[in-house]
């Protein structure tokens, strides 16, 4: 998979059959009925072994999100059990080449035609584009921010085709390509929510699933970087002693370990808040920022410790470095994350998607387990501050942080 750069459909299906795509799907639909923290740990551990397959799982989770939050009962009963059993890989298709992350700048459109819609346009950088069975497609049905709508489009529908995959720098085995819609007709029953809900579908999927999912991929890659570098430094000898005994090397290992621990706490804390339906957009944003930047910083340290040995493909360091760069742009670059954090600091942020959406569906599993998840206050209210502080305290007392890595003490 790594050498051939081919999309591994069989491995994707094998992982899906383990039920990991259905982690956040309720048990009534055959899923595991767990939350975002459990999902984060699963994606992290898969990414620790294969960033490509971790990316596959996280991209499929984006496809799950739109159905959980916006699907009607019929759509949920039709698709969620199949996804939970690994029989269907869902995707979400929002980005277009000419508009990038400017969602409102998209040009792909859908026109009403009798009892259905006709879709035309192109979507690019679609995770699982070439293995997905069900695409969640955001297109224009009108003007302005209320003119976007979301549709479920089966991969075998006439008028839907896939452009040839281009070779990518990293995440070999994971396909993120282009979907082409040429008079692709879908029935009206495939509309997610109602006309005009497309922006909410796109933003909620990106913020509540995309950012934490990519955070988990970065965390898994980061963990692998630390594992490999610690092992290398312990095995190699210089001047009659293990390489890790050199003060300069030991300092780099300490920096890597510190970053990993900080990144993991930021990630787990953010999704723990999300599971409890506490407004946590800034925590989700910060977790993605920290995990991506820290993984890239540690990748550089790993290359410095490995020196020339890290340049060859017989060791995983160069792969991990390439994979880490792929997590930078999706769901917002670090510059975008910093702008959003500044808006929260200045009090100019317009909305908290975690408050608007998460409590409606994303925390069902935690309701069933008797955990308090209701939250009806604005982020600035005293009650909100109290509940946020309680959730922070709960995070450190309830989540299981993996033990310190061997050799990094």
Image (cartoon, grey):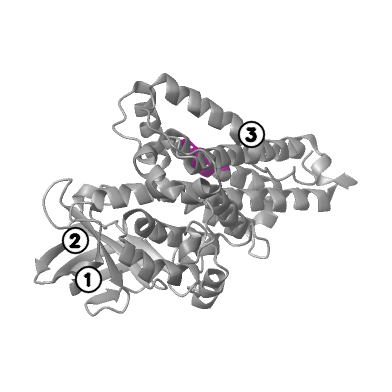
Please state if 244 lies on the left or on the right of 166 as rendered. right
Mark 3 lies on a secondary structure that is helix
Mark 1 lies on a secondary structure that is strand
Q: Is residue 70 above or below residue 247?
A: below
The stretch drawn in magenta includes residue 83: no
Task: Indicate which disc residue 396 carries.
Answer: 3
Please state if 361 lies on the left or on the right of 387 as rendered. left
Residue at the (25%, 75%) spot, across then down: 160
The residue tagged 1 is 181
Residue closer to the observer: 26 or 186: 26
Q: Which mark is first along the chain, 2 or 1?
A: 2
Residue at the (48%, 67%) spot, across then down: 84
Of all residues, the one furthest to the left in this rendering is 114
Q: Residues within 10 Å of mark 1 (few under 14, many from 20)?
A: many
Please state if 160 lies on the left or on the right of 352 as rendered. left
Q: Which of the two discs, 1 and 3, sits closer to the camera?
A: 3
The residue tagged 2 is 108
Q: Are marks 1 and 2 in contact (CB under 8 Å)?
A: yes
Q: Which mark is first along the chain, 3 or 1?
A: 1
- Marks 2/3: CA distance? 45 Å
Residue 90 in the image: x percent, y percent? 40, 66
Q: Is residue 162 visible?
A: yes
Q: Main secondary structure of the magenta part?
A: helix
- Marks 1/2: CA distance? 8 Å
Rendered image quadrant of residue 186 = bottom left
Residue 18 in the image: x percent, y percent? 58, 69
- Which residues make up the magenta segment? 286-294
Q: Is residue 63 above or below residue 15?
A: above
Residue closer to the observer: 147 or 218: 147
Question: What is the number of callouts on the image?
Answer: 3
Q: Is residue 166 visible?
A: no
């Amino acid at each position: 998979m790594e050498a051939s750069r081919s999309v591994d459909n069989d491995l994707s299906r094998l992982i899906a059959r383990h039920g990991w795509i259905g982690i956040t799907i309720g048990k009534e639909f055959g899923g595991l009925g767990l939350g975002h923290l459990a999902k984060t740990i699963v994606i992290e551990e898969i990414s620790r072994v294969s960033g490509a397959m971790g990316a596959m799982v996280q991209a499929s989770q984006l496809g799950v999100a739109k159905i959980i939050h916006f699907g009607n009962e019929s759509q949920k009963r039709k698709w969620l059990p199949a996804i939970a059993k690994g029989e269907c890989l869902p995707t979400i298709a929002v980005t277009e080449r000419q508009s990038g992350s400017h969602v409102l700048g998209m040009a792909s459109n859908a026109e009403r035609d009798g009892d259905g819609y006709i879709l035309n346009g192109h979507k690019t950088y679609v995770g699982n584009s070439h293995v997905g069975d069900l695409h969640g497609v955001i297109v224009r049905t009108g003007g302005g921010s209320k003119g976007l709508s979301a549709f479920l489009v089966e991969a075998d529908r006439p008028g839907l085709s896939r452009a040839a995959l281009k070779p990518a720098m990293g995440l070999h085995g994971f396909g993120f390509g282009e979907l082409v819609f040429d008079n692709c007709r879908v029935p009206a029953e495939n509309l997610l929510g109602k006309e005009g809900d497309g922006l909410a579908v796109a933003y909620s999927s990106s913020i509540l699933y995309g950012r934490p999912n990519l955070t988990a991929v970065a965390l898994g890659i980061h963990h692998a970087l630390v594992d490999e570098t610690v092992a290398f430094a312990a095995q190699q000898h210089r001047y009659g002693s293990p390489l890790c005994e050199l003060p300069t090397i030991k300092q780099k290992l300490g920096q890597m370990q510190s970053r990993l621990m900080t990144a993991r706490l930021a990630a787990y804390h953010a999704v723990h808040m999300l599971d409890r339906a506490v407004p946590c957009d800034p925590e989700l944003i910060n977790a993605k920022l920290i995990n991506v930047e820290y993984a890239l910083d540690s990748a550089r340290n790993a290359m410095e410790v490995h020196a020339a040995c890290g340049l060859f493909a017989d060791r995983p360091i160069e792969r991990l470095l390439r994979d880490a760069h792929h997590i930078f742009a999706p769901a917002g670059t670090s510059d975008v994350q910093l702008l959003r954090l500044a808006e929260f600091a200045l009090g100019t942020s317009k909305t908290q998607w975690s408050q608007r959406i998460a409590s409606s569906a994303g925390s069902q599993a935690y309701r069933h387990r008797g955990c308090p998840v209701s939250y009806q206050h604005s982020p600035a209210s005293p009650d909100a501050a109290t509940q946020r502080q309680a959730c922070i305290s709960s995070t450190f007392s309830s989540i299981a942080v993996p033990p310190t890595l061997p050799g990094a003490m």
